[in-house]
Image: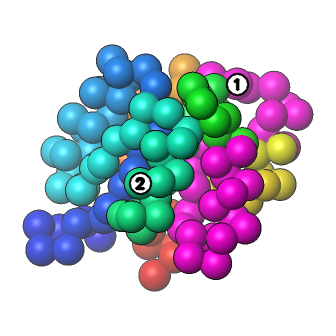
């Protein structure tokens, strides 16, 4: 799990600064190493540079949608195995299906999950992928 010597590296790609701040605060309390990008292009670039352990990805983003980011990540040998959790307000069945088909590990609707629940999902995901 996350510890001070070897924290879980998370990249949060989210354009809502208030919401992002809440998630970053909660994840820092869990000793996660959190980086943030506020648009799809930055998120893709940071993924290449940082190679995080997990990506939390919004779908509605400036410059490049989360679906396009996800497609690009899964085509690249360097990033295709990084687990991606879609964290979005899009709750339509078609959006959920599309996200999972594109390779997302999980699909969380922001309004239904507290930051602490998202942290627990990340911990379970990392434990399962060890």
Give the answer, above or below, for where 40 lies relative to 104.
above
Residue under pointer 1: 90
Q: Quadrant of the N terminus?
A: bottom left
Near-viewer residue (76 or 8): 76
Near-viewer residue (19 or 37): 37
Q: Is residue 122 magenta?
A: no
Residue under pointer 2: 46
Q: Identify the residue at horizontal 64%, vertical 36% (top origin).
A: 64
Is residue 79 toward the left or the right of residue 16 in the image? right
Q: Which residues are magenta?
A: 68-97
Near-viewer residue (55 or 113): 55
Tag 1 secondary structure = loop
Q: Identify the residue at horizontal 18%, vertical 55% (top origin).
A: 31
* Nearer mark to the viewer, of 2 and 1: 2
Judge the density around disc 1: few (<14), some (14-19), many (≥20) Cα neighbours within 10 Å.
Answer: some
Q: Position of residue 27 (x, y in %)?
A: 27, 45
Q: How far apart are labels 2 and 1 at the CA level?
A: 24 Å
């Amino acid at each position: 799990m996350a510890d001070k010597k070897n924290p879980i590296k998370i990249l949060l790609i989210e354009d809502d600064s208030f919401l992002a701040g809440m998630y970053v605060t909660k994840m820092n309390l869990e000793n996660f190493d959190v980086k943030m990008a506020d648009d799809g292009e930055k998120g893709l670039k940071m993924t290449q540079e940082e190679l995080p352990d997990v990506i939390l990805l919004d779908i509605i983003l400036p410059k490049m949608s989360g679906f396009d980011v996800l497609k690009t990540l899964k085509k690249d040998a360097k990033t295709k195995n990084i687990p991606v959790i879609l964290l979005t307000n899009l709750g339509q069945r078609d959006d959920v299906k599309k996200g999972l088909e594109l390779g997302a590990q999980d699909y969380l609707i922001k309004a239904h999950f507290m930051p602490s629940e998202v942290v627990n999902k990340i911990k379970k995901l990392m434990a399962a992928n060890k």
